[in-house]
Structures are given as structure tokens and as C-alpha cells.
């Protein structure tokens, strides 16, 4: 996904950049190429970054065990920050001239810039390789850690591990001090360049001496650059900084971070970061929308019906397998799986009946039906149905956490009383979310100008019962004042989902620790619970990508980027229609009992090992 995201961005930057971006696109290409190299290293090494007591460890879980490549990987992580700081400096230089593309980047300048990036990465990698080296004093703690995660200790730890101890006898070594000074220098210079350039750009954009067209063009480039900076800050630099600092805090030797935590966060970065370029720069966003329109336009009715049929087929297949092919240990958990699949089927049916369309058009957020009949009530219930899926996942995680902690590890009974209580909680959350949508996303007469303008662009007529037809909000009024009532409604919706998210995170951490450290669990039981936990993680990742993240983007964008984002009607509808098709496949293919049963139907059971 990281490769696909960067390749799409590269294609758009190389082929769809306007003349004004001729120079700046060269820096964008450098940034995306470095992202692709990072993705390649990430896939080859599959690095695991952990803190265990006073030890900081990086080791490879991929096909190559090489400290040199791990050090290169660390240098590549640091280089992205320097590249982004150069982008800020270039934008400040370009915007300081009346002709906003005057700063030319000929091959000599580009060569110097690339050399600066490579030198910084090489120095960072060299310091990591030499100063974070394995020593005999680390061996006992490192061996204990590898035993705790059920992995063999490296045969050649000197050439396979990046490691350092926080509280080493004799204090911090000179090498570590030199490394810290270098890091501080690089970070300080880069942050200083970013802050100075940002202040200059903001002042320039606020000037009355520039045209509105010029201001709008450079504003979107600046906003895109800020988002490009924030994404690695939250996915790379801040998590990495915390992990490096923690060994010096003198925490308990038993404190250990999960092996998947930072690795997963780092893996998400190359997927997400190019999206800021694609979706926040108008030329690339429009080009991608046009490509999508050409791809999606043929046979729309047949396409929708095929999606519905595939969703129903996928869920019914999973339902049959769960009901008939579950082993005895899953006799209770399958009840939750059945509840999940039934709600998935209901979601598919409602999706087909309503055919909802959600759009952002500047300050306007709107949900309406694709047909002539409109209903605010049904659209509110549809939104409640989306919200309830996250609560269902929270119960799945909580059940798995409780079952893995019990003495029998699986025998937590879900009798009729408990199931009734669980369903009642689901219904309460469903009605609460639907109520918030109905009340806070209701039509107001002040919305009419923006609503009629949008429908005119879509060549559609407004319905007669406009007061009870849509879910709609406008983020700012005509005077540019924030609509706090609408913002409160969005915060309430996010608060409902946040409770479920907290339950999922706490349960996932508990399950991970239990699978890693509990010794009384048999190998068979550990394998089964690991399999179920992995399937559940994939199950929750699918709606995160296809439901919750797009939905959050649509809700937040009118407040954060007013008059900037204009989404096509088909975009989120297409993502939502894929969800009920894909999500049951995680149950079918990641739980061995169901996977083998399905493969037997096609005579392929011997082709794929049970593991």
C-alpha cells in the first residue's frame, strides 16, 4: 500500500503539475522517491523497535539481518525531516517573489540539495551503527528479552542488533553524547528553518498586495506541506523520540513495549504521507478524481448491484462457516461473530436501499440519497449503524481479553441474559448516534444558499420537504464565525466512538502482553488465540480504512480547511460499499478452521498449509 500510494503520487506530480509547479515538483519527486526507498527498506527488514527496561533495541524480523541496513533505515527516517524543511524553505523563497515560480532548481542546485540529504542520512546512519553497538554488558538483558518474546537470540548480535542501555555504569558514553549533539543540531536547524519559513509564508499570504488567485494557490501548497509535516511528526519523530528517551527514565526491568507497536506506526507513514500531496493540492486531487470518474462511470447500476450481491455472499459464507465449522473452543465466541455478521448484512441491505451520498463542498458537509426520495430519519439511522460497528469490535476485543485471562482460556459463557444485555448496549449506542446526527445535522434556512448552489452544480433539483431531507452542516456562517453548535455535534459523535476506541486499545495491549509473557498457556492454545487476535486486528483495520478514517475526514475538513476541499459524490460511497464485502473475508481466511473448510469446497485444502 505504501508503494502504491507513492507511485500514484509520483505519477500525478510528474504528469499533472501546472506550469507554476515546474520547479517545486522536483522537490516533491525527491520526497516521494525517498519515501519509496523507505518503504523498500521497511519491507525487506521488517524492523522491530522496542524498549525493554533500560534497553533500546532494533532488530530485523524480515529476510535480511543486517545492522548496516538497519542503520541505513534509521538514516532514512531522519532524512525525511530534512527534506520537509527544505520544502518549507523553497516555498518561502518562491512566495517572496512576485513571480511565484522564479526560484529555479537547475541540476547543480538539485545535486547539492540531494548531497545534503544523503550526507545527513549517512552521518545519522554511521552514528547509529557505531554508537548503538552491542556490548557484553547488554547480553543478559537482551537474551532475557528474546526469550520473553519466544525468539532465538541473534547468532551475531554485533552485526544484527542496534542497541543501547539507558543507565550504563560509568554514565553516558562520549559516543552517545556526540550522537545526541548531532541529533539536536539537525533537529534544531530543521525546526528553525520550518518555523521561520512558515512565519514568512503566513505574513506573505496575509498581504493585501497579492491577488486572491495567487493567495489561494500558495495557501493550498502551504496547507499540504503542513500536513506533510504533521504526519511524520506523529507517526515517526514523536514516537521514535519517546522510545529513545524511555530507557533513560529508569523504569522497571519488566517494562516492555509490544513488538508490533512502533513497527506498525512506522509502516503506516509511507501509506498516509503521499495522500497529503494527492488530496490537498488541487491539480492532483482533480486529476485523481477524473481518473476515478472514468473508471467508475461505466454501468453504475450494475456496479452497485454487484457490490451488494458480493457483500451478501461474503457475509452469508462467513455466517455458514461460523455456524457449522467452529471448533468447541469457539462455541461461545462464535456468538459474537454471528452478531457482527448479522449487523454487516443489515448494513449491506440499508446501503442498497438508501444508496447514500456524502460530500464535502468547502464549508458544507452533506449526506443525501441518490434517488428522488430523501429522509433525514433514515440517513440518521444509517449513520448510527456505521457507529455501532465500532462498538461491536470493542466487545470482540474485550471478550478476547477476558477469555485469554481466564483459567480455561476459552470458557466464558455468553448465556441468553448476557447476549441480551450486549445487544441492548449495541441498540442504545445505535440510537444515541442516530439521535445526535438527527439533532445536530438538521437543516436550517441559513444553509439554503450553499445547498442550492451545490445541487445546481450536480444538475439536481432540491426536494419539496427540504427541512427533513438531509443530514447537513455548515462549519462557518456568512460572517466567517465558527458554528459552535455543529462542532459540538461532531465532538459528541467522536466521543461516543472514542469510548469504544479506548476499550479496543486497552484490550489489545492486554492480549499482546498475555500472549508474550504467560508461560502456562499451551502451544496449541497460544496459536489459536494469536490467530483469533490477528483476525480481529485485520477486521478492525478494514473499517478504519474504509469507514472511520474517511468519515472523520469528511466531518473535520469543513472546519479545518473551509473552501479548500470539494469531494466527488462517488468517493465515500464506493469505500463504504467495499466494507461489507471485504470485512467477513478476514474471518474466513485468517481463522484456520474456516479457511480449511472453504478450501475443501474448492478441492484446494492440500495446497495451503494450516499455519
Image: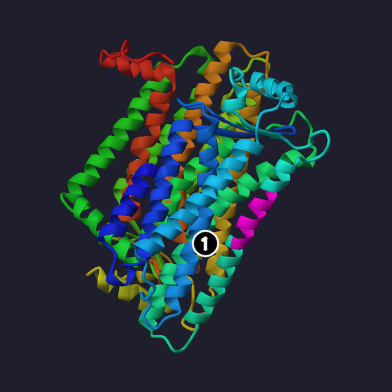
Q: Is residue 371 visible?
A: no
549 versus 472 height, above or below: above
552 versus 427 height, above or below: below
SS under mark 1: helix
Q: Tell me where residue 91 sits by quadrant.
A: bottom left
In this rendered view, identify the residue nearer to me: 590 or 376: 590
* Bounds of the magenta segment: 180-189
Does the magenta-highlighted stretch encompass residue 186? yes
From the viewer's perspective, tell me whether residue 446 is left or right of residue 515. left
- Residue located 58% across and 37% down the image: 261
From the viewer's perspective, tell me whether residue 513 is left or right of residue 589. right
Main secondary-structure element of the magenta-colored stretch: helix
- Residue located 66% across and 42% down the image: 243
Q: Tell me where residue 605 sits by quadrant.
A: top left
Q: How many marks?
A: 1
Does the magenta-highlighted stretch encompass residue 16? no
* Residue at far right of view: 170
- Residue located 44% across and 32% down the image: 44
- Residue located 66% across and 18% down the image: 147
In this rendered view, identify the residue nearer to me: 561 or 326: 561
In this rendered view, identify the residue nearer to me: 513 or 499: 513
Q: Quadrant of the N terminus?
A: top left
Whole-percent x, y for residue 510 in the image: 65, 31
379 versus 65 height, above or below: below
Mark 1 neighbour class, 10 Å CA radius: few under 14, some 14 to 19, many 20 or more:
many
In this rendered view, identify the residue nearer to me: 335 or 517: 517
Amino acid at each position: 500500500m505504501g508503494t502504491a500510494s507513492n507511485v500514484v503520487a509520483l505519477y500525478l506530480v510528474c504528469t499533472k503539475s501546472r506550469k507554476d509547479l515546474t520547479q517545486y515538483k522536483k522537490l516533491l519527486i525527491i520526497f516521494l522517491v525517498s519515501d519509496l526507498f523507505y518503504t523498500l527498506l521497511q519491507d525487506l527488514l521488517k524492523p522491530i523497535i522496542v524498549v525493554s527496561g533500560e534497553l533500546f533495541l532494533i532488530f530485523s524480523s524480515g529476510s535480511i539481518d543486517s545492522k548496516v541496513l538497519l542503520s541505513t533505515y534509521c538514516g532514512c527516517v531522519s532524512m525525511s525531516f530534512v527534506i520537509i524543511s527544505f520544502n518549507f524553505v523553497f516555498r518561502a523563497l518562491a512566495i517572496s517573489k512576485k513571480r511565484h515560480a522564479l526560484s529555479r532548481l537547475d541540476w547543480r542546485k538539485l545535486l547539492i540539495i540531494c548531497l545534503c540529504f544523503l550526507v545527513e542520512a549517512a552521518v545519522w546512519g554511521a552514528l547509529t551503527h557505531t554508537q548503538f553497538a552491542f556490548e557484553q554488558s547488554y547480553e543478559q538483558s537482551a537474551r532475557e528479552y528474546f526469550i520473553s518474546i519466544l525468539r532465538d537470540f541473534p547468532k551475531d548480535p554485533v552485526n544484527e542488533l542496534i542497541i543501547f542501555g539507558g543507565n550504563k555504569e560509568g554514565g553516558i558514553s562520549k559516543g552517545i553524547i556526540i550522537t545526541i549533539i548531532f541529533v539536536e543540531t539537525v533537529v534544531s536547524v530543521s525546526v528553525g528553518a520550518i518555523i521561520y519559513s512558515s512565519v514568512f509564508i503566513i505574513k506573505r499570504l496575509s498581504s493585501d498586495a497579492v491577488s486572491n488567485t495567487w493567495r489561494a494557490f500558495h495557501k493550498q501548497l502551504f496547507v499540504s506541506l503542513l500536513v506533510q509535516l504533521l504526519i511524520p511528526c506523529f507517526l515517526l519523530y514523536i514516537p521514535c523520540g519517546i522510545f529513545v528517551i524511555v530507557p533513560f527514565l529508569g523504569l522497571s526491568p519488566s517494562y516492555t513495549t509490544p513488538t508490533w507497536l512502533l513497527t506498525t506506526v512506522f509502516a503506516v507513514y509511507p501509506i498516509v504521507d503521499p495522500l497529503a500531496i494527492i488530496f490537498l493540492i488541487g491539480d492532483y486531487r482533480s486529476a485523481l478524481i477524473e481518473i476515478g470518474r472514468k473508471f467508475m462511470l461505466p454501468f453504475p447500476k450494475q456496479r452497485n448491484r454487484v457490490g451488494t450481491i458480493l457483500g451478501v455472499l461474503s457475509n452469508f459464507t462467513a455466517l455458514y462457516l461460523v455456524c457449522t465449522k467452529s471448533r468447541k473452543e469457539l462455541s461461545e465466541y462464535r456468538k459474537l461473530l454471528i452478531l457482527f455478521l448479522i449487523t454487516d448484512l443489515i448494513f449491506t441491505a440499508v446501503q442498497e436501499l438508501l444508496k447514500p451520498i456524502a460530500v464535502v463542498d468547502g464549508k458544507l458537509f452533506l449526506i443525501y440519497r441518490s434517488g428522488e426520495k430523501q429522509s433525514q430519519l433514515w440517513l440518521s439511522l444509517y449513520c448510527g449503524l456505521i457507529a455501532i460497528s465500532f462498538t461491536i469490535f470493542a466487545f470482540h476485543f474485550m471478550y478476547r481479553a477476558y477469555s485469554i485471562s481466564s483459567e480455561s482460556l476459552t470458557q466464558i459463557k455468553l448465556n441468553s441474559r448476557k447476549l441480551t444485555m450486549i445487544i441492548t448496549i449495541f441498540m442504545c449506542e445505535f440510537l444515541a448516534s442516530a439521535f445526535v446526527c438527527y439533532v445536530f445535522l438538521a437543516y436550517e434556512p441559513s444553509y439554503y444558499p450553499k445547498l442550492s448552489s451545490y445541487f445546481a452544480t450536480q444538475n439536481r433539483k432540491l426536494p419539496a420537504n427540504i427541512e427533513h431531507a438531509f443530514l447537513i452542516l455548515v462549519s462557518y456562517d456568512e460572517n466567517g464565525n465558527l458554528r459552535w453548535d455543529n462542532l459540538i455535534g461532531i465532538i459528541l459523535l467522536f466521543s461516543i466512538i472514542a469510548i469504544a476506541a479506548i476499550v479496543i486499545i486497552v484490550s489489545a495491549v492486554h492480549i499482546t502482553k498475555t500472549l508474550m509473557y504467560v508461560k502456562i498457556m499451551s502451544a496449541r492454545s497460544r496459536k489459536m488465540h494469536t490467530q483469533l487476535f490477528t483476525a480481529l486486528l485485520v477486521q478492525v483495520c478494514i473499517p478504519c480504512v474504509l469507514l472511520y478514517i474517511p468519515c472523520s475526514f469528511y466531518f473535520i475538513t469543513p472546519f479545518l480547511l473551509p473552501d479548500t476541499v470539494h469531494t466527488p459524490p462517488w468517493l465515500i460511497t464506493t469505500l463504504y460499499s467495499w466494507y461489507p464485502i471485504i470485512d467477513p473475508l478476514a474471518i474466513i481466511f485468517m481463522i484456520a478452521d474456516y479457511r480449511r473448510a472453504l478450501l475443501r469446497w474448492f478441492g484446494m485444502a492440500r495446497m495451503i498449509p494450516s499455519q
